[in-house]
Image: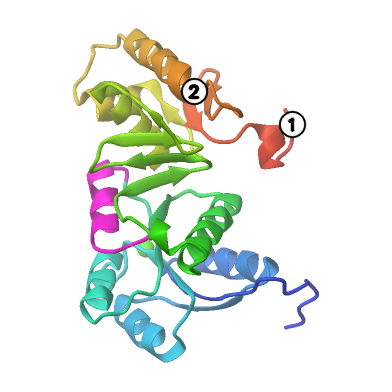
């Protein structure tokens, strides 16, 4: 196909996704962004293609018909292959996502994802591994969004390189928002995941903790914890920054 876009920084990417619509969407969006893209739809074929093509990065769906994305990545790493892996996950459980990073994935995006978010993560990973800073080798237990870093093992949060002390609940809340970066989570979902039990509808505690968290995390610019009125909260860049339509 004709490529009219400037190939400024094109990488070879492999998409592993068994959902045809998502696969097609990713392929065309990534090509538009200047990358060379191929795709496959099973875990076993992914292992073959990764060895054959040696891609710069693999976008790996977690739920595949044969081997799941975690298992594929585990096998890759066991074979000494350190090709960066960006997981596409529909799972909502933080534990599963962290498990994905522990088997040696580099990052993940949650479905439904925005293409902007996928591109941002890809760029971040490739910048990291292209080795301008080998001291900042990718730590698998770090969640990242914009200039915000959360280390799930050291229980530390940094924004723009600056350490932010958080209480355990604030930490859990931020981890949950970061795991779902770019998508809106309701107060009920937050209660469920952060407090792990039903607060019998009293979601004022969520409001309170979001306020605490904002004081610490969003005293920086731009604010990242967005209120979506009548729906819930979302960790994302403000609309002007994200370049989407104003509303
Ligand atoms: Ca799937």
Mark 1 CB near ligand 1 (8 Å cut): no
Most foreground residue, 90 or 181:
181
Q: For residue 169, which quarter of the picture?
A: top left
Question: Which residue was labeled with disc 2?
Answer: 231
- Which residues are drawn in magenta? 92-106
- x, y percent for residue 13: 52, 75
Question: Which residue was labeled with disc 1?
Answer: 246
- x, y percent for residue 80: 26, 80
**Residue 82 marker:** none
Residue at x-position 41% and y-position 35%? 158
Q: Label 1: few (<14), some or many (≥20) within 10 Å?
A: few
Is residue 10 something that shows in the picture? yes
Is 105 covered by the magenta stretch? yes
Is residue 180 something that shows in the picture? no
Residue at x-position 41% and y-position 38%? 178
Residue at x-position 52% and y-position 18%? 230
Is 31 covered by the magenta stretch? no
């Amino acid at each position: 196909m004709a490529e009219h876009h400037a190939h400024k920084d094109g990488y070879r990417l492999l998409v592993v996704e068994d959902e045809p619509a998502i696969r097609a969407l990713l392929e065309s969006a990534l090509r538009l962004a200047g990358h060379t893209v191929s795709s496959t739809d099973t875990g076993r074929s992914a292992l073959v293609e990764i060895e054959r093509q040696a891609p710069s990065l693999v976008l790996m769906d977690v739920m595949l018909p044969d081997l799941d994305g975690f298992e594929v990545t585990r096998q890759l790493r066991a074979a000494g292959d350190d090709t960066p892996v960006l997981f596409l996950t529909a799972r909502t459980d933080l534990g599963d996502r962290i498990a994905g990073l522990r088997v040696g994935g580099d990052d993940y995006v949650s479905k439904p994802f925005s293409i902007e978010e996928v591109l941002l993560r890809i760029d971040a990973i490739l910048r990291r591994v292209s080795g301008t800073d080998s001291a900042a080798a990718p730590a698998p237990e770090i969640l990242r969004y914009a200039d915000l870093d959360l280390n799930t093992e050291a229980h530390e949060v940094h924004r723009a390189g600056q350490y932010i002390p958080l209480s355990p609940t604030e930490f859990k809340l931020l981890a949950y928002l970061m795991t779902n970066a770019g998508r809106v989570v309701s107060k009920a979902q937050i209660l469920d995941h952060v407090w792990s039990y039903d607060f019998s509808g009293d979601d004022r505690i969520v409001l309170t903790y979001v306020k605490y968290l904002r004081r610490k995390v969003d005293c920086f610019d731009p604010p990242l914890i967005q209120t979506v009125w009548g729906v819930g909260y979302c960790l994302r860049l403000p609309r002007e920054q994200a370049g989407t339509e104003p509303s």
